[in-house]
Image: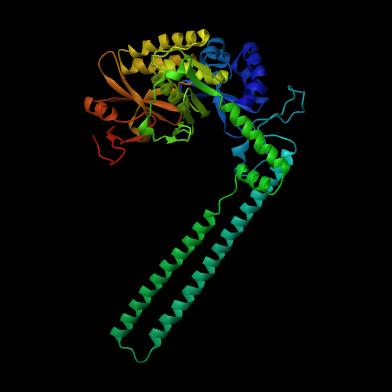
Amino acid sequence: MRWVKETAGPELVEGAAKAANWGELHAVLERHGLAIRRKGAGLVIVQEETGLGVKASSVDRSLSAKSLTKRLGAYEPPPAPIQRRPNGDSSQGAAEAARFVTSAPAGDPTQPGRSYQKVPLHRHGNSKALYQEYQAQREALLKARAAQRAAQRQAQAEHVKELVGWYAARRAEIKRSPVLTAAERRHAYTMLAHQRRADAVAWRQEQARQRQQAAGQSLPTWQEFLAVEASRGNEVAVAVLRSRSRRQRRMAENLLTATDADVARHIVYERLRPKAGRDGALVYRVEDGGVVSDEATQVRVTEVTTGAAFLALSLADDRFRGRALVVEGSQEFRTQVAQLAAMKGLEVRFADPELEQKRAQLAERMTQAEGSTSVTDFVSQRNSRREVVTSIDYTRLWTASDAGPVVYQGRRRLQDGAEVVLLHRGGETLVKPVTPAQAAKASTWRVGQTVELDSRGRLLSPSRGRKR
């Protein structure tokens, strides 16, 4: 997202404005190793080389499906697949500390041939050389692991060959024995077969133990590598770790509070099992990786995700009820909070007039869907709002092929009295009509909880798997 916006974004917006047809727009994208493709009812910009992609409207509104089809007509795919260029970095685990960069020289943003490359996210001093050393160590460990597995396979083949020969010799001895009767010979064959099966089981168990032992030796992450190097006195590693700490503190500035927060109520969401600190702060960890710290006079988001932003907003709504919320942090965080407040129908208001106006406008659009006269109308209106609220995923009706685990996102009652549940999976929101009994069962679930449906649309109990 960062690379597309900062590096390719301006040219893509200009190209979309000047393009007379889809072919010209595809040509602009191809210069960056990108393609624009259909996904559901919208468009995504993908890098063919890696398969990574972002919603086109998230880059710029002029790149949304509605805007482009209005100007260029119905979507037309690229004439041929974009040729993939080799990526110089094949190491596993590099993605945990990666960002988008350009291969063009600095100061030449128009140079073609730019592509995704993995480099340290936290760049400080000689961190490039340090990161190359980290990659070399990981590569050496991967090669050692591969050699160990090859040796195990070779040992297994030799053992099987030896075992076959040994038991063949034992069977030959039994067959040639002059003292065994026919019954004794059959019994000896049976006992030999039992012994062979027992040996095979013992061998497989030993092999499984060795594989598990090898798998338990996990590869070091970039963070672990830096910690080890810093403990050895590597000053560059210390500087990189400290720059990461400063970045985390900047992220922690995403918070919600109120002007008279000292008289706020104290709320605990016990079902989310928070951990209490010595200063009384309650730390909540959300399933999507977000972290929220509920402190004395503010609610702080230390790891920003959609789930964390919604939890922080809910906590602030409960704690500072009736007072205008002060939202601090990045513009992306503030926008996300306003969108979530409108989407979830929370009765909050913001102290910032501009942010409050944005929330009110979005909330007005949201109320239209609550008055939907049918499930189809509800789905259609949600998809139409994706052009305004970027955090809304593509919505469609649940089908039997969607059976399996999904993430529960809440219930809605439509104007005709029907009730539906919203389920999330694979970047899509699935709308599932439910009976009154199923709606009552869903009311016991919490938003973000993983539930399961069978192919007949029956809701399985998350705890016991019973059907309703």
| Left or right placement of residue 147 versus residue 388 in this view | right
Q: Is residue 287 left or right of residue 431?
A: right
At horizontal 33% and vertical 84% (from top left) the residue drawn is 185
Q: Residue 386, how many percent across, how many down?
A: 47, 17
Q: Which residue sits furthest bottom? A: 179
The reply to whether residue 139 is visible in this rendering is yes
Query: In the orientation shown, which residue stands out farthest toward the left?
Result: 437
Question: Can you say which quadrant of the picture contains the N terminus?
Answer: top right
Which quadrant holds the C terminus?
A: top left
Q: Position of residue 172 (x, y in %)?
A: 42, 83
Q: How is the image coloured?
A: rainbow
Observer able to see residue 117: no
**In the foreground, 142 or 354:** 354
Residue in front for this viewpoint, 162 or 297: 297
Residue 355 lies, in percent from the top left, at 51, 11
In the foreground, 206 or 79: 206
**Residue at the spot x=45%, y=81% of the render?**
169
Horizontally, residue 26 falls left or right of residue 383, namely right
Locate residue 149 relative to residue 458 in the image: left or right. Answer: right
The mark tally for this picture is 0
Decide: is 288 above or below 130: above
